[in-house]
Image (cartoon, rainbow, N blue to C red):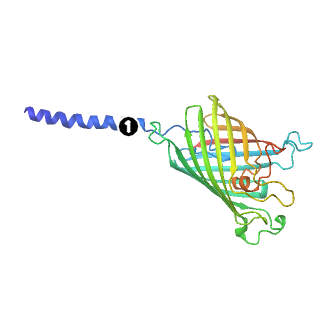
């Protein structure tokens, strides 16, 4: 009888211990909270992916150059640009999206996939996310000097691997190497460009952050033959972000005007430190279904 009691006790207590250990491990190894508030950081993507069935609506605007004459710091500038986009989380780790951009009438289809999640225990110290898109230039061939000889000439592509870490509740940082490609390019320009971006956020209050974004071209291009302007200027942005549970508003100074990442990487001639600054903002709103 005594042996039966011991066996009964063992069968009862071992599952409880195992369940308690499993519960403890699952709590410790929960995914870390998002490193950033929004899916984008000025002109680059972040590692943020929203829960399944989340719809994100985004509006991005870039005014003209601040030094443009009679433009009220670029607000009246003729070279302003705007993009309106939607993205939808079909899974917790997969988001698809579509956007339209005023400059060159670009339509872009994009995909974002979470590959690795930072955990609260530190067992996985980083988050890794892939972002890619295909852009389609919607201008007529005549408007682009007949460069679109085939339909494929309108296509451009962008691939980026986002490596991010949430160091503390206030500070997050990411590194993002990328490859941009245009099927058709101007004479003397390469079809591909490799770049690397660095971005960070520091919270100064629960809803307010200072944000920085820096993109450095690695592949060098020749200067524009007609204007002499350089295509090798890095992208520099500094600004502030104001966020709530469903909104994010970013306002900043930048020298990127293209908005679509392959256009920023390949065709930017603005020098941040030489009359190339402009004001921009991003607004996002999320809806959960």
Q: Position of residue 55 (x, y in %)?
A: 60, 46
How packed mark 1 is, by other alpha carbons closer than 10 Å (few <14, some 14-19, many 20 or more), is few
Residue 228 sits above or below residue 209 on the image: below
Residue 204 sits above or below residue 86 on the image: above
Residue matched to label 1: 25
Q: Position of residue 146 (x, y in %)?
A: 82, 69
Name of the residue lying farthest toward the left: 1
- Nearest the viewer among 138 and 251 is 251
Residue drawn where x is 59% and y is 50% of the image: 88
Looking at the rendering, in which quadrant would you find the C terminus? top right
As drawn, is 255 to the left or to the right of 31?
Answer: right
Looking at the rendering, in which quadrant would you find the N terminus? top left
- Nearest the viewer among 109 and 191 is 191
Name of the residue lying farthest toward the right: 70
Name of the residue lying farthest toward the bottom: 149
Which of the 4 quarters of the picture holds residue 68? top right
Q: Position of residue 167 (x, y in %)?
A: 55, 35
Where disc 1 sits, the SS reads: helix
Residue drawn where x is 86% and y is 46% of the image: 77
- Nearest the viewer among 249 and 171 is 171
Q: Position of residue 42 (x, y in %)?
A: 69, 43
Count of numbered badges drawn on the protein: 1
Which of the 4 quarters of the picture holds residue 21? top left
As drawn, is 176 to the left or to the right of 105?
Answer: left
Residue drawn where x is 18% and y is 33% of the image: 9
């Amino acid at each position: 009888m005594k042996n039966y009691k011991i066996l009964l006790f063992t069968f009862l207590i071992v599952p409880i211990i195992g369940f308690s250990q499993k519960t403890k491990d699952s709590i410790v190894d929960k995914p870390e909270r998002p490193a950033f508030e929004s899916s984008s950081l000025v002109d680059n993507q972040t590692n943020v992916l929203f829960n399944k069935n989340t719809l994100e609506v985004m509006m991005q605007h870039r005014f003209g150059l601040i030094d443009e004459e009679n433009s009220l710091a670029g607000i009246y500038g003729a070279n302003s640009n705007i993009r309106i986009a939607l993205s939808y989380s079909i899974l917790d780790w997969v988001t698809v999206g579509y956007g339209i951009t005023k400059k060159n009438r670009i339509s872009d289809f994009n995909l974002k996939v979470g590959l690795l999640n930072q955990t609260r225990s530190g067992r996985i110290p980083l988050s890794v996310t892939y972002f890619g898109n295909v852009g389609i230039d919607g201008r007529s061939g005549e408007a682009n000097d007949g460069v679109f000889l085939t339909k494929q000439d309108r296509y451009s592509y962008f691939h980026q691997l986002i490596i991010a870490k949430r160091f503390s509740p206030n500070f997050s940082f990411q590194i993002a190497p990328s490859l941009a490609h245009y099927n058709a390019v101007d004479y003397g320009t390469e079809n591909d460009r490799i770049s690397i971006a660095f971005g960070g956020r520091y919270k100064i209050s629960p809803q307010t952050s200072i944000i920085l974004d820096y993109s450095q071209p690695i592949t060098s291009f020749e200067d524009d033959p007609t204007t002499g302007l350089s295509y090798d200027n890095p992208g520099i942005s500094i600004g502030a972000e104001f966020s709530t549970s469903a909104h994010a508003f970013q306002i900043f100074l930048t020298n990127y005007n293209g908005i679509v990442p392959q256009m920023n990487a390949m065709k930017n001639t603005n020098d941040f430190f030489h009359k190339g600054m402009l004001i921009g903002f991003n607004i996002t709103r999320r809806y959960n279904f």
